[in-house]
Amino acid sequence: MPLCDGFAVAAAMRESACFAAVPIIGYSSLNEAEVVERGKQAQIDAFCRKGNTLHCLFELIEFMAPVGPAGT
């Protein structure tokens, strides 16, 4: 993103009452050590490295934000 990166977006979400409790999953090709450090600062909840299968990302989404019966 040219104006800000995902870490800046995550930090801004955490400062907003509307989005403070929304789970945030980082999806990046950066090395894991950098993502973990910057992710902690931005309060990102989980991380999935680009290059893994999308199935891994979908499982992580389901774990972080499960949907109950009838979309609840």
Image (tube, rainbow, N blue to C red):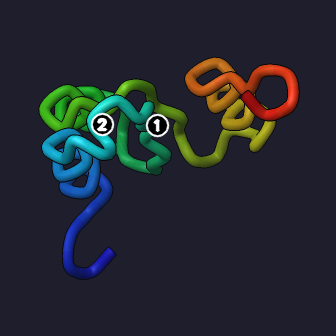
Q: How many marks?
A: 2
SS at circle 2: helix
Badge 1 crowding class, 10 Å Cα cut-off, few under 14, some 14 to 19, many 20 or more, is: some
Badge 2 crowding class, 10 Å Cα cut-off, few under 14, some 14 to 19, many 20 or more, is: many
Q: Picture coordinates of residue 56 (x, y %)?
A: 72, 30
Q: Which residue is mark 2?
A: 35
Q: Residue at x 18, y 52 (%)?
A: 12
Q: Nearer the viewer, mark 2 or mark 1?
A: 1
Q: In the rendered structure, which amino acid carries the disc numbered 2?
A: Val
32 sits to left or right of 34: right
* Quarter of the rendering occupied by the C terminus: top right
Label annotation for residue 25:
1
Residue nearer the viewer, 34 or 10? 10
Q: Picture coordinates of residue 45 (x, y %)?
A: 38, 25
* Cα separation between marks 2 and 1: 11 Å
Q: Earlier in the sequence, mark 2 or mark 1?
A: 1
34 sits to left or right of 47: left
